[in-house]
Image (cartoon, coloured by chain):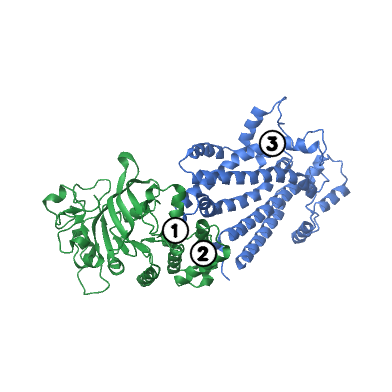
Chain colours: A green, B blue
């Protein structure tokens, strides 16, 4: 496997402090490798977005990172911990190394500034010496890259369709050629045709430019198609992580299997949709043991008692995947 | 552009309606201004003089209402607002042009200062939410609910007196003649300080509150998070992204408040006996001086309409979403 570009180590993120705090992300270990698309899936409230905001230190108050490390490997320099950067270093790191396309991409553009202003101000902030002309040239280039006519440079966001706005955001994310692009439900607000068009384009761009993607969505069927590896989150923890094909073929964790069962696959034979009974856990009062056990069809004795650790399962392809489930007790825990 | 012309047409229509009402209302009020004058001069007027007074006020009985209305417009375009009763035979336009500069300078300058100061503080308080600036909020809420005139009365009670630097009334020392010289100007400034402070203190809080609240609302928008994620400096995010968008309601509020400058802060001018339009209107009311009232109402109406137009233009310039294509 290729070298890592972003390593999340024992990350804990909570909202609020003290007794009132809600732990939204718990002991997450996740590694993004160079050039891969890592999918992150889970129900609403599973901590996917919080994880993304935590990694980039963009948590809105009262969110706080309570522990862990986010190690970034620049490729040509020593790796460093993003969470330990000073404000100035962080500002330089942002967008240069890690860009984000947000969930509310429809509202990600400032309505009162032209597209060109919003594309070029990021260039200005990161490279003050760049001339205005070359900034504009670069912005046009990016628009062309995502399939928008360069004459839309002077348009305001409200003059663009939802799909176009999302493309502008993707173009904006790539303008500084970052190593990592985090996409937080980038296509949720778009129709299915537009979703696939934009994702297809993104994958093509990734092959051309070679960045890595963390793709966050609750739509597992999309991930199966577009990502290399998939991590499934439940109740703030990663419960399973495996190559996309392995998850699709035989998900080890009952929750992953449940998620897969609740979406119609875009290709392949017809099958019955099942869904997962119950509702996502309350982060304030998590069930004991495995947080999924009250909803799990396969729950047995140890589930309610102890939290299963994420580790390599004893299956034949066990070296390439990890799971946190008592059905697959592990010999090699991940990240400890 | 089309939108702008539509607005302009609307304001012209409104102005016409307001002026027409302004013409009819005094004529519907029972009583006759000439009779009031006759009483005032206690029968010392000859019947000829009374007749000519009727003609002078445009109330000669020969002309029908329509004729009067046409004449009214003609006079209006000639800048003739009629003659004042109380200051007979001074033309109303002269009285207004004497009192207008006082109001424009006092209320105009304080409105502008108050807007910029309040908006600036509001940006700061909104952006630094959760810091010590939040402590200012109860104070501003209190001050914004205090009426101008009450604050003025308190100021006069506490700060003026025989030995005080602050004069309690008037626009300048009674011994001086209005002129642009080294005696009159400092005196005028000295007299304006207290009313200006009164207006400033009670109006600045409104700007602070509304700007702060808009900042807080805008700060939770997605594009602010994006701006942070882009690695823009905090200052740039605060000014170009947050404040720029939060400013919109305040700017239209500001344009509207410009319209009320001419109307003056009537009560402040009354409390300080300040020689502005508001005080003049107060005197006109007391003396049933219809032409003067009519003239002042006209000026206020027009300035409110112009201010509304300014607000529309400001919005067109600041918010691209209001600009229609084509």
**Mark pair 2, 1: CA separation:** 19 Å
The residue lying toward the viewer, choosing from A46 and B93, is A46
The residue lying toward the viewer, choosing from A267 and B44, is A267
Q: Residue at x 32, y 64 (%)?
A: A37
* Label 1: element kind: loop
Q: In the current view of this chain or complex, which residue is farthest to the top?
A: B163
The residue lying toward the viewer, choosing from B213 and B173, is B213
Chain assignment, label 1: A
**Mark pair 3, 2: CA separation:** 47 Å
User: In this figure, which residue is indicated by the disc labeled 2?
Assistant: A115
The disc at residue A96 is: 1
Do badges 2 and 1 share one subunit? yes
User: In this figure, which residue is indicated by the disc labeled 3?
Assistant: B193
Rendered location of residue B204, percent (x, y):
59, 42
**Mark pair 3, 1: CA separation:** 54 Å
Q: How many marks?
A: 3
């Amino acid at each position: 496997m290729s070298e890592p570009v972003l390593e999340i180590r024992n990350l804990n993120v909570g909202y609020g402090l003290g007794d009132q705090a809600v732990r939204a992300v718990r002991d997450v270990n996740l590694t993004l490798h160079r050039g891969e698309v890592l999918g992150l899936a889970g129900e609403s409230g599973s901590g996917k977005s919080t994880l993304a905001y935590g990694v980039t230190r963009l948590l809105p108050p009262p969110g706080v990172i309570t522990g862990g490390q986010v190690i970034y490997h620049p490729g040509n320099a020593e790796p460093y911990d993003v969470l330990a950067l000073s404000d100035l270093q962080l500002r330089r790191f942002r967008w240069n190394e890690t860009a984000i396309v947000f969930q509310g991409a429809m509202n990600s553009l400032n309505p009162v500034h032209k597209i060109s202003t919003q594309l070029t101000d990021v260039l200005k902030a990161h490279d003050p010496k760049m001339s205005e002309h070359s900034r504009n040239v670069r912005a046009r280039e990016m628009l062309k890259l995502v399939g928008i006519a360069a004459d839309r440079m002077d348009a305001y966001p409200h003059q663009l369709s939802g799909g176009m706005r999302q493309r502008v955001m993707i173009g904006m994310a790539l303008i500084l050629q970052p190593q990592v692009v985090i996409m937080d439900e980038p296509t949720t607000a778009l129709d299915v045709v537009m979703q696939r068009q934009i994702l297809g384009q993104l994958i093509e761009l990734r092959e051309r430019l070679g960045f890595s993607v963390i793709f966050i969505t609750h739509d597992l069927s999309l991930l199966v198609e577009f990502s290399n590896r998939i991590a499934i989150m439940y109740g703030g923890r990663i419960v399973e992580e495996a190559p996309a094909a392995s998850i699709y073929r035989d998900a080890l964790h009952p929750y992953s299997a449940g998620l897969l069962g609740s979406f119609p696959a875009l290709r392949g034979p017809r099958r019955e949709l099942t869904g997962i009974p119950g509702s996502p856990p309350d982060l304030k009062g998590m069930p004991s043991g495995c947080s999924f056990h009250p909803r799990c069809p396969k729950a047995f004795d140890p589930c309610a008692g102890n939290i299963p650790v994420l580790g390599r399962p004893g299956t034949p392809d066990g070296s390439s995947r990890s799971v946190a489930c008592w059905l697959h007790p592990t010999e090699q825990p991940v990240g400890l | 552009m089309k939108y702008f012309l539509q607005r302009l047409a609307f304001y012209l229509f409104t102005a016409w309606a307001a002026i027409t009402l302004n013409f009819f209302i005094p004529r519907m009020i029972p009583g006759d201004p000439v009779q009031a004058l006759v009483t005032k001069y206690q029968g010392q007027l000859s019947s000829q003089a009374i007749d000519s007074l009727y003609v002078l006020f445009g109330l000669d009985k020969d002309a029908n209402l329509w004729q009067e209305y046409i004449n009214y417009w003609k006079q209006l375009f000639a800048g003739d607002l009629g003659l004042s009763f109380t200051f007979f035979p001074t033309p109303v336009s002269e009285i207004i042009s004497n009192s207008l500069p006082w109001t424009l300078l006092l209320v105009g300058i304080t409105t502008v200062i108050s807007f910029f100061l309040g908006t600036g503080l509001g940006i700061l308080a909104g952006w630094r939410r959760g810091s010590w600036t939040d402590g200012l909020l109860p104070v501003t809420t209190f001050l914004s609910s205090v009426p101008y005139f009450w604050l003025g009365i308190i100021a006069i009670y506490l700060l003026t007196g025989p030995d005080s630097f602050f004069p309690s009334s008037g626009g300048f020392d009674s011994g001086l003649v209005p002129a642009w010289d080294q005696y009159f100007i400092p005196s005028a400034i000295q007299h304006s300080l207290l009313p200006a402070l009164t207006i400033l203190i009670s109006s600045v809080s409104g700007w602070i509150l509304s700007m702060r609240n808009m900042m807080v609302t805008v700060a939770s928008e997605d594009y602010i998070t994006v701006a942070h994620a882009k690695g823009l400096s905090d200052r740039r995010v605060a000014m170009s992204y947050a404040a720029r968008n939060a400013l919109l309601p305040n700017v239209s509020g500001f344009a509207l408040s410009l319209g009320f400058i001419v109307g003056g802060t009537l009560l402040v001018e009354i409390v300080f006996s300040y020689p502005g339009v508001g005080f003049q209107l107060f005197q006109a009311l007391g003396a049933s001086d219809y032409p003067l009232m009519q003239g002042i109402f006209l000026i206020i109406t027009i300035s409110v309409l112009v201010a509304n137009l300014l607000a529309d233009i400001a919005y067109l310039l600041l918010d691209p979403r209001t600009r229609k294509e084509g």
